[in-house]
Image (cartoon, grey):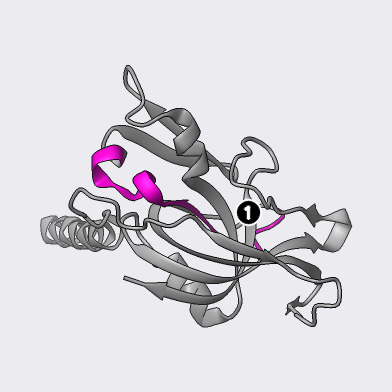
Amino acid sequence: MRLFWLLLMLAGGVLGLIRYVQTRPIERPPGVLAPHAPFQAQLSRESEVRLEKPGYQFRPVAYFELEARVLSKRLYRYDAASAISPVDLVLGWGRMSDTAVLSKLRIWQSDRFYFYAWFRQPPIPQEEIILSSANMHLIPGNPNIELRLKRLKPGHLVKIKGFLVNVAGPNGFYWRTSTARYDTGNGACEIVWVADLMVR
């Protein structure tokens, strides 16, 4: 009986170690790692971009491309949007990709929102935090991209190409993307159809 409990504890320890390795943030030296703000270009009404997932309609409103540092990741399984967007990422660029800045901020996600806090005073002006980071609802363009998004960890550097989209779905579901960097609060998140993903 004691052997059984010993083996059970050993198995639990191994699983815990595997979980830690899979989720621990990637360490990066100080310095800006993603210097450029996201790029987007409006699409014409005659655009022939066609994005499809069963039961949903997608209206691309802009071509979108960015290179950024993953600051936080949250998986969603049970909310109204999880069928198309199982992953939210908090992404940072400019000084919000610099370890020297990020080490002085606490960053977390909840209910499709992104939050940050600091002790005493922010390491950079709050306006710059807003302009240089965002919580993005990601819609993977294929199963391979979905798997890779789910495996991301804070500290990864990603390059994403795709589209900002508005989404309509079952039971009156409607999601409208932000197209600005300066907004905050409800409706401020970008909804990104991820057509291409590079990770380093």
Q: Nearer the viewer, residue 141 or 196?
A: 196
Residue 20 seen in the current view: yes
The disc labelled 1 sits on which kind of residue? Glu
Which residue is found at the position 80% from the left and 78% from the top? 47
Q: Position of residue 150 (x, y in %)?
A: 45, 66
Which residue is found at the position 68% from the left and 52% from the top? 179
Q: Nearer the viewer, residue 190 or 149?
A: 190
Which residue is found at the position 46% from the left and 45% from the top? 132
Task: Determine whether the residue tagged by mark 1 lies in a helix, strand or loop.
Answer: strand
Q: Position of residue 145 (x, y in %)?
A: 51, 77
For the record, the magenta segment spans 80-101
Q: Position of residue 198 (x, y in %)?
A: 41, 75
Q: Nearer the viewer, residue 109 or 102?
A: 102
The verdict on residue 112 being magenta is: no
In the displayed structure, 84 sits above or below 134; it is below
Residue 115 seen in the current view: no
> Looking at this rendering, what residue extends furthest in the top direction?
120
